[in-house]
Amino acid sequence: RKAMSDREGGVADRKEEREALREEIREATRERDEQRSLVAEAESDLSDLTDRRDRLEWEIDELESQVGAYDADEIPDLDEVESRIEELESEMEALEPVNMLAIDEYEEVQAALDELQERRDVLVEERDAIEERIEGYEAAKKETFMETFESINDHFEDIFARLSAGTGELVLENPEDPFEEGLTMKAQPADKPVQRLDAMSGGEKSLTALSFIFAVQRHNPAPFYALDEIDAFLDAVNAERVGEMIEELAEEAQFVVVGHRSALLERSDRAIGVTMQGDNLSAVTGMRFGDDADEEGVSADD
């Protein structure tokens, strides 16, 4: 029994030792956890400090790069800066009192200026549009003129060749801007050199002028033409050619011609002759040509 009692006493001691060890283990575990927590907190603080250090180093680099362009000797000291501030404050005080109405007046003037600017912009747009339209009209006018000129020139070359057996053409003095300069007629009657109009004979001038008139008539026919003594400077051959031309053109228009030569009279549908009588009276005689031609005379005071 004593041995049993001793054994039980030993077991109890071992249990106490075991509990004491367990308590020590638990205490050590708590201390370990606390130390781990402290380490984690320290690592977090270290990371924050590292980030802050990096940020400060970056800001320092930026400031150094900005300040690096300046000479340290040129940077004023604090006393100089404060003195300059006092000077500026004194200048500001000298400007007082401030007219607060000036702000309203400025806003009114600015609004009026903005309105004028808008009106100006509108006027500029309208001006540009008008100029564009004018340029379009000018281009269309020039195109129409050149088409007309080329057509009349073709007719002039053909008609002048028929009337004079020579060559002729119309020449613009300024083809790039035909409205700024005039028109020149180059005419070379048969077997003669090219001459200016004022150097031609009366007959050559008549043929040139008639060629131009007939060329215009071909391009833009009119229903009625009146020609006064166009044969006055023409010889018989040229008068015959002009008569043939008028007879051809008379198929599309009516011609009233005052002339002296039979080349024109023979090709007319009706002729009216006027002669002076001895008693200062004009005798007017009308003649109709054709199968049913008749003759009638009328007298009138001169």
Image (cartoon, rainbow, N blue to C red):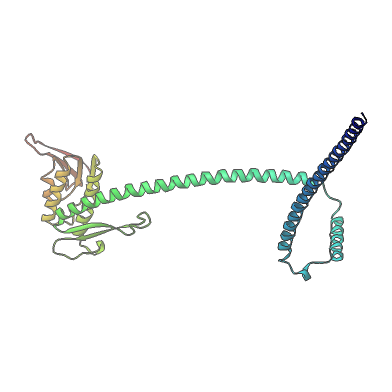
Residue 206 occupies quadrant:
bottom left
Q: Answer whether residue 257 is visible to the viewer in this image.
A: yes
Which residue ends up furthest to the bottom in the rendered image? 73
- Name which quarter of the figure residue 23 lies in: top right
- Residue at 11% x, 49% y is 263
Give whichever of 46, 193 is nearer the camera: 46
Which residue extends farthest top?
A: 1
**Image location (x, y in percent) of residue 249:** 17, 44
Image position, residue 58 (x, y; %): 72, 57
Residue in front for this viewpoint, 234 or 44 = 44
Judge whether 266 appears above or below 195 on screen: above
- What residue do we see at 76% from left, 52% from top? 52
Q: Quadrant of residue 282?
A: top left
**In the rendering, at what x and y percent does residue 203 appear?**
18, 58
Quadrant including the C terminus: top left
Extreme residue toward the left, this view? 291
Left or right of 27? Residue 165 is: left
Q: Is residue 210 visible?
A: no
Give the tally of numbered discs. 0
Looking at the image, is 175 positioned above or below residue 108? Answer: below
Residue 143 in percent (x, y) is at: 33, 48
Q: Is residue 112 left or right of residue 224?
A: right
- For the N terminus, the image quarter is top right
* Point 11% across, 51% down: residue: 240
**Residue nearer the viewer, 12 or 212:** 12
